[in-house]
Amino acid sequence: MTNNIDSIVKKSKEVSLKWRDIPAPQRGEFIRQFGEELRLQKEALAQTITKEARKIKTESLGEVQEAIDMCDFAVGLSRQLYGLTMPSERPNHRLQELWHPLGVVGCITAFNFPMAVFAWNFCLAAVCGNSVIWKPSPHSNECAKSIKAAWDKVSGDFSDLILILEGGNEEAVSICKDNRITLVSATGSTKMGKELAPIVSARLGKLLLELGGNNAAIVCPSANLDLTIKGIAFSACGTTGQRCTSLRRLFVHKEIYDDCVKRLEKCFDDLIIGCPTKEDSQIGPLISEESYNSMQKVLNSLRNKGVQVLGGERLEIESPEEYYVKPALVLVDDIVDEMLSETFAPILYVKRYEDLKDAIHMQNNVSQGLSSSIFTNDMRESELFLSESGSDCGIANVNIGTSGAEIGGAFGGEKDTGGGRESGSDAWKNYMRRVTATINYGEELPLAQGVEFDES
Ligand code: UN1
């Protein structure tokens, strides 16, 4: 294995040295063609996602679209890797920042977004002049291979710009240890991040982390409940609750609590759970027996405490090896410990609130800080939620669920979510090194801060 990583890193380093000499807009042209190839293969790629990650068709197609969107974004960006020019305090001096490639980027991705999250990283890393070594989740090696095959169709001499390292924890650790890999971008659980980050930090490598969430929404009395229920259902149950942005906790104002819970119960009852290849299925199976077991463990522990759990049971549909579950609604009077950690399954905790400030406090009072939402038509409430005393998450939405972000914004969150920002806005800066250049075009040598130093 050590040999394997060694030869992969050597190859990746080699190609990165050639790639960085290609002007950025020309690198963008490769990514444009990559996007075209993804468009052509959209249907087939989506089928591979459904096969491995077991997502329903519309979500698999949406994921490929997310990768295509990233290509389009990166093409434009390849002409916009701007550095600032600052006024120098000295006469005849220019002060400017330059952005240069890092070299080799390591990218560790999870099963639940087996193509899009790689595209977030690869498209930016590539236009910024880097090569990428990709360790996909062991659940989604085929997705990784199909993406690499699409790249190979358009990449000419630069096939090695994507190199895949298949494997599990051991391979992830080998990426983290290798000081030729300048940046390690990792998506997965907080537990994984906390294991890998110290290895990268010990060699003072750069890290970009997108870890667990424990996302909450607040439903205010003025909310449009039709829109709200739809937003909650998609965020809590879509992708079988296996997005890092999935909605896990709901705080509902006491005036509308009963109505809201009644409608949610009906909505959860009506969801169509079934094989993801079937046209009308809305919820496919969980990824593994292990994730089913961790869901049941949490639900059993809640039941033992006397907490009301609706749904959550296994449904014996389709093949007996797969784990289909009914999403669980958990009605809590008080905060229970189970709500404080992320269970990667469709469990939605619902709690009453009276005062919006309390609801915001409960929302923030967890170790994770990825995504959050408020449903309201009262601008004072939404503005409070978005203010510095509002949501402490990296993503804060109004009248939208917690999941399903567009690529144009920076994606990521605070605290145990790891602090990284990927995809849109200025996330590209993570994949470059900044050089501050001061140029003296005069005949004198004035020193900064007025310091005098005469050599004679
Ligand atoms: C993830 O689950 O790691 O915002 C990424 C969303 C998707 C990305 C999720 N666009 O739900």
Image (tube, grey):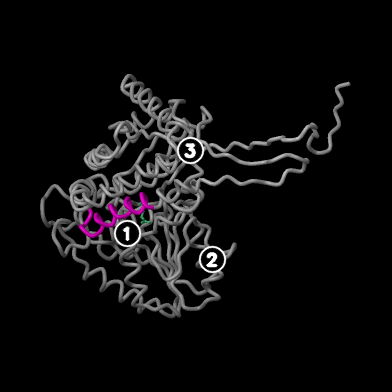
> Helix, strand or loop at disc 2?
helix
Q: Position of residue 382 (x, y in %)?
A: 51, 71
The magenta segment: 55-72
- Tell me which label, 1 or 3, sits earlier in the chain: 3
Q: Amino acid at mark 1?
A: Ile
Please identify, in this view, whether the residue under mark 1 or under mark 3 is nearer the observer.
3
Residue type at mark 3: give it: Leu
For residue 90: magenta? no
State the image coordinates of residue 137 (x, y, percent, origin top left): 29, 39
Q: What's the CA distance linking mark 1 and mark 3? A: 31 Å
Question: How many C-alpha atoms fall within 10 Å of the one at disc 3: few (<14), some, or many (≥20)?
Answer: many
What residue is at 45 percent from the left and 51 percent from the top?
412
Q: Secondary structure at mark 1?
A: strand
Mark in front: 1 vs 2: 2
Residue 13, x across and y down, in percent: 40, 26
Instruction: Ligand 1: give its quadrant.
Output: bottom left
Q: Residue furthest top?
A: 3
Q: Is residue 67 magenta?
A: yes
- Quadrant in the picture for residue 264: bottom left
Q: Which residue is mark 2?
A: 386
Identified by mark 2, the residue type is Leu
Identify the residue position indicated by label 3 in the image. 207
Is residue 59 or residue 174 the one in the foreground?
A: 59
Element class at badge 3? strand
